[in-house]
Image (cartoon, coloured by chain):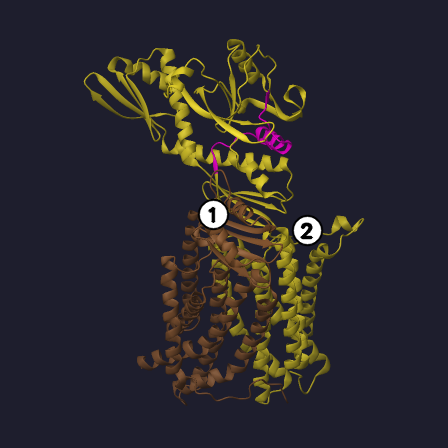
């Protein structure tokens, strides 16, 4: 018995030392050589305690596929015209492109598709007289791959933007098929962050369609052109005005070929901030070609389907440098530079959940929650001592061990403490008290039957163990299911409670029994203060 | 040896009180069922977590009446708005079905309305919660699935540790507790949010623990007192034996939760309230519902 008792105390002690080591960084910062050997992680506070923003974004995959098919459609049309494949009709529907051709053109079309559009699969074909109606579609597998890539790309882009914006400890993870969870703790300007993250940032250069301006004023939009709005700020009043503008539909150059974007001030732009952009070799070559071919025409700079400016090309521009103006404030220009550098999102994102907690609300709840928990704890500690006298002290020691182990485990596992998490701790303490009450009531019963102290303690623990085990297992089942099906705060609660319940099995039964056994062995009491 | 005792040795006829208890519980359960139907129909006070929409916590720098604020917002065209005053502060909870549009956050829209109409009052949005309606629906579904799976797993566990009858009785008692909490929240028109679901699950676990403790003793005494006494007295004897434990545990838990209830601040109030009710009901049901159910069923089987 002595040997096993020693062993039990050593086990309790080892856990205690480990817990204290892990808890240490929460209360003081180790210095010097100690720093190397001690863990340095503190308990992570959740957004509800620290304040910050929690966003759930959904990538618009419908729009993504639409863009994809639009692009293929345009490219196919161009390629057919280039190669002289004569077609009678060309249209698109969902992820299918249909082409009507005369029978003799079929071979040529198939060759073209096989060579340049290998991801398009031939669908069903219909024959009407000597006209063939052929359809081509993106296979399911291809679509799934595109979506998967797009989400990954969006994740990467958003991470880049947030990194450049400067937020400490952001969480950016994929959730489900096409959702992205973003948590920005302690963020000061949530509105600005949201705009930065949510912007698609699709930069395009298109020519203004000045040839058809008369027709447009008459109310019709010619084929191959489109109408977008131009945004301009009145320098005196600061009010934004929008005007419709007729543009060639084809984008001559996009932001994909961008290598850098910087905020600059001054020069010809009235000391207003503007964004200077730089293209890579290919981008520079294309830009050079566009400007050489279109001197005297207006080139529109478009971001997310809004025209920011449409300057007249005065001369051929080599070197791949351009600037975006639009009456920006300093902040706007900075954010625009960030999104341009980080790249465009593959499709628009929609905010489907946005929880913003001001830092004061967070601090307020942590202070009140901790105060209440402390008061409740103190009341219970005194009650246990009042009701069970000396044994109550042992129960309180077990409770204290439980709390220390729990905090140690929590820090070591890098779990995040949330408000429901604190509730979970309080509940764990409640279960710890319950276990001891069960044991002590049993011991009392055994003592009433006239058993010796030692026999009563042994029998009390043995009989109560069955009950405690059952009740802890049922709680573990609940927490496991909460963890599997719950989200966010519920998960935090489940984690704390399950760790707490497991630790409690150890401290309330194993730990307190060791103390009892030691007392019985050393002091051999005739009666027990319980 | 002398002990400090809340209850001395008791000899209460719990089985004899079963019909009164059943009537009381029937009221609770019916209330709960009404609550459940209303929740399913979306007519209860569900938080934006489940319905989708926006909830704001707005803090004014000076006193303002809830009527003024409501007037301001309805004049601005927000008809589905619900406003709740956080007592003792200048803070309000504003809830609306509106969610973020492409160009603008609902939070800003509401902020603008307040700023435009209550020019002289300074305010600050201290917290906001916007949930798209698809997320809300998914969450509601997940919560119900989790609750059902948890209960089924627990029946299986108890049926395995005890007998099938005990498992069913424990589960009925647990359903009774969950429904009672739902009913009370519905009657008081308190908000049901994620924390409320957490509370329901916690109480399901707590109530089961309580029931298991009592069942454990019944099982033990049934083996010991087999031939000597009838089922009713075995059950009564067992409940009386564990009564002091039941009361002490409930008392200590209630004290801790009570501390959060009164001092934990408005964020935790509803959660603590749900737990508080749950502890009371959970304790009641393990004594007055679960055990008598075992008695009735066993007796009929014989």
Where does the image place residue A466, in percent across and percent down from the top left?
Answer: 52, 74
| B259 to the left or right of B129 | right
- Few, some or many C-alpha atoms within 10 Å of disc 2 (few <14, some 14-19, many ≥20)? some
**What quarter of the picture does the N terminus of chain A occupy?**
bottom right
Q: Residue furthest left?
A: A129
Q: Secondary structure at mark 1?
A: loop
Residue located beneath label 1 in the image? B76
**What quarter of the picture does the C terminus of chain A occupy?**
bottom right
Q: Identify the disc placed on residue A529.
A: none
Nearer to the camera, A355 or A501: A355
Question: Do marks 1 and 2 share a chain?
Answer: no
Q: Secondary structure at mark 2?
A: loop
Chain A painted colour: yellow
Q: Residue at x 80, y 49 (%)?
A: A33
Inspect this view and state whether residue A117 appears: no
- CA separation, marks 1 and 2? 49 Å
Q: Give the quarter of the image for residue B289.
A: bottom left
Where does the image place residue B206, in percent across and percent down from the top left?
Answer: 50, 69
Residue located beneath label 2 in the image? A41
**Badge nearest the viewer, 1 or 2:** 1
Nearer to the camera, A439 or A165: A165
Vertical comparison of A327 with A459: above or below = above
- Few, some or many C-alpha atoms within 10 Å of disc 1 (few <14, some 14-19, many ≥20)? some
Q: Is residue A328 magenta?
A: yes
Chain B painted colour: brown
- What's the chain of the residue with tag 1? B
Inspect this view and state whether residue A482 appears: yes
Q: Residue at x 34, y 78 (%)?
A: B297
Tell me where the magenta segment starts and ends, as one range. Answer: A323-349
């Amino acid at each position: 018995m002595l040997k096993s008792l020693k062993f039990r105390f050593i086990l309790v002690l080892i856990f205690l030392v480990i817990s204290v080591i892990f808890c240490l960084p929460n209360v003081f910062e180790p210095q010097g050589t100690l720093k190397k050997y001690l863990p340095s992680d503190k308990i992570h506070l959740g957004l509800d305690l620290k304040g910050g923003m929690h966003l759930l974004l959904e990538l618009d995959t419908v729009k993504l596929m639409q863009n994809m098919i639009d692009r293929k459609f345009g490219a196919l049309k161009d390629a057919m015209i280039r190669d002289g494949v004569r077609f009678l009709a060309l249209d698109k529907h969902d992820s299918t492109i249909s082409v009507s051709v005369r029978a003799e053109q079929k071979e040529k079309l198939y060759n073209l598709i096989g060579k340049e559009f290998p991801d398009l699969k031939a669908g069903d074909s219909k024959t009407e007289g000597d006209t063939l109606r052929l359809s081509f579609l993106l296979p399911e597998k291809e679509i799934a791959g595109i979506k998967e890539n797009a989400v990954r790309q969006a994740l990467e882009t958003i991470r880049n933007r947030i990194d450049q914006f400067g937020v400490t400890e952001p969480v950016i993870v994929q959730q489900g098929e096409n959702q992205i969870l973003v948590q920005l703790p302690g963020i000061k300007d949530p509105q600005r962050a949201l705009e930065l993250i949510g912007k698609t940032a699709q930069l395009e250069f298109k020519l203004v369609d000045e040839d058809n301006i008369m027709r447009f004023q008459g109310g019709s939009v010619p084929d191959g052109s489109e109408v977008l709005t131009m945004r301009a700020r009145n320098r005196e009043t600061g009010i934004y005005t929008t005007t419709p503008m007729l543009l060639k539909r084809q984008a001559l150059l996009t932001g994909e070929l961008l290598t850098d974007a910087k905020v600059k001030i001054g020069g010809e732009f009235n000391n207003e901030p503007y964004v200077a952009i730089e293209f890579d070799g290919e981008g520079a070559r294309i830009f050079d070609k566009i400007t050489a071919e279109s001197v005297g025409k207006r080139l529109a700079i478009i971001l997310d389907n809004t025209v920011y400016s449409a300057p007249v090309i005065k001369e051929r521009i080599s070197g791949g440098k351009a600037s975006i103006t639009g009456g920006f404030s300093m902040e706007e220009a900075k954010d625009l530079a960030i999104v341009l550098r980080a790249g465009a999102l593959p499709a628009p994102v929609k905010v489907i959940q946005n929880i913003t907690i001001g830092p004061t609300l967070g601090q307020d709840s942590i202070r009140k929650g901790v105060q209440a928990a402390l008061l409740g704890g103190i009341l219970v500690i005194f009650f246990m001592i009042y009701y069970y006298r000396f044994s109550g002290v042992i129960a309180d020691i077990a409770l204290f061990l439980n709390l220390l182990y729990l905090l140690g485990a929590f820090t070591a596992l890098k779990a995040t403490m949330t408000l429901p998490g604190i509730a979970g701790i309080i509940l764990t303490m409640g279960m710890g008290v319950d276990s001891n009450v069960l044991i002590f009531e049993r011991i009392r019963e055994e003592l009433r039957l006239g058993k010796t102290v030692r026999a009563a303690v042994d029998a009390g623990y043995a009989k109560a163990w069955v009950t405690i085990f059952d009740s802890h297992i049922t709680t573990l089942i609940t927490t496991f299911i909460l963890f599997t099906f719950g989200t966010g705060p519920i998960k935090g609660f489940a984690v704390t409670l399950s760790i707490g319940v497991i630790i409690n099995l150890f401290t309330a039964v194993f730990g307190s029994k060791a103390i009892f056994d030691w007392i019985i062995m050393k002091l051999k009491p005739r009666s027990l203060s319980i | 040896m002398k002990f400090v005792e809340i209850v001395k040795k008791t000899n209460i006829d719990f089985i004899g009180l079963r019909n009164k208890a059943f009537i009381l519980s029937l009221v609770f359960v019916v209330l709960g069922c009404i609550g459940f139907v209303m929740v399913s129909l979306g007519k209860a006070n569900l938080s934006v977590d489940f319905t989708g929409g926006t909830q704001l916590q707005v803090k004014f720098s000076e006193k303002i009446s809830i009527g003024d604020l409501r007037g301001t917002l309805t004049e601005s065209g927000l008809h589905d708005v619900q406003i709740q005053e956080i007592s003792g502060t200048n803070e309000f909870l504003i809830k609306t079905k509106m969610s973020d549009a492409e160009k603008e956050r609902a939070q800003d829209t509401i902020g603008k309305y307040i700023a435009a109409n209550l020019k002289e009052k300074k305010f600050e949005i201290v917290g906001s919660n916007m949930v798209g309606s698809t997320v809300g629906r998914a969450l509601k579904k997940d919560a119900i699935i989790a609750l059902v799976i948890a209960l089924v797993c627990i029946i299986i566990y108890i049926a395995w540790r005890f007998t099938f009858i005990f498992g069913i009785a424990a589960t009925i008692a647990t359903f009774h507790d969950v429904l009672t909490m739902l009913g009370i929240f519905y009657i008081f028109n308190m908000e049901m949010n994620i924390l409320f679901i957490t509370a329901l699950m916690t109480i399901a676990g707590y109530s089961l623990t309580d029931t298991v403790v009592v069942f454990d003793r019944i099982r033990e005494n049934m083996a010991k007192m087999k031939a000597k006494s009838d089922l009713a007295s075995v059950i009564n004897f067992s409940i009386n034996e564990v009564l002091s434990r039941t009361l002490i545990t409930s008392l200590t838990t209630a004290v801790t939760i009570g501390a959060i209830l009164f001092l934990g601040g408005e964020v935790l109030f509803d959660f603590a309230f749900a737990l508080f009710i749950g502890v009371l009901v959970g304790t009641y049901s393990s004594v007055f519902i679960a055990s008598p159910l075992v008695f009735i069923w066993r007796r009929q089987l014989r």
